[in-house]
Image (cartoon, rainbow, N blue to C red):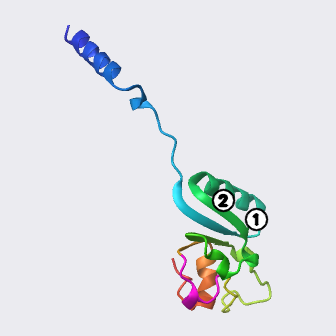
Amino acid sequence: MRVLFFGCLIGWLMSSLPANTWAVDEPTKQPLRVLYLARNDEARETAFTEFLAANFVQSASMPRDQFKPEMAAPYDVVLVDWSQMEINDPNADWDAPRNYPSPLGDRAHWSTPTVLLGSAGQILAGPWETIGGAG
């Protein structure tokens, strides 16, 4: 009798709730404008581009080597994707300091929030004179 009573009570409670109570809402896009500076990997760029388009109100991508710092102005966040494989110099000592020009320009003039993907932090450590080889 007790099981029947609680079963009826639960059934009544569930039927009295609005129909959309149990519905799963579609995720809303984050209100950010994101620019992805891609590495030389077409499949990776496609995956990031699709992910960003699905999750942010505005997104764009471009090859990292075509980017100029002033292009970041309309965006809230810049993602920099850089692989050590792109800068591998087989003639250099593995521990020799390597400085590559920063696609983001001078560190003192860069103020856009940035996410460094792959080895971007380590590679940017040289031109930006920061610690990037640890972690």
Q: Is residue 50 left or right of residue 32?
A: right
Magenta part, dominant SS = loop
Q: For the point 58% across and 64% down, which residue is it?
A: 33
Considering every residue shown, the one lying at the far front of the view is: 74
Is residue 62 in view?
A: yes
- Residue at x-position 20% and y-position 7%: 1
Q: Of the residues tagged 2 and 1, which is closer to the observer?
A: 2
Name the residue beneath numbered marker 1.
41
Observer-nearest residue: 24 or 119?
24
Q: Is residue 108 magenta?
A: yes
Q: Which mark is residue 48?
A: 2
Asked which quadrant contains residue 34, the reply is bottom right
Determine contact: label 2, label 1, CB under 8 Å: no
Q: CA distance from mark 2 to mark 1?
A: 11 Å
Residue type at mark 1: give it. Answer: Asp
> Which of the 4 image quadrants contains residue 94?
bottom right
Dot 1: what SS?
loop
- Position of residue 44 measured from the top left corner of the image (x, y, whole percent): 71, 60
Magenta-colored span? 104-112
Q: Give the vertical position of 115 relative to 68 (above or below).
A: above
Q: Is residue 121 above or below residue 127?
A: above
Q: Which mark is residue 79?
A: none
Question: Could you tell me residue 66's position as x and y percent?
Answer: 76, 77
- Residue 92 sits inside the magenta stretch: no
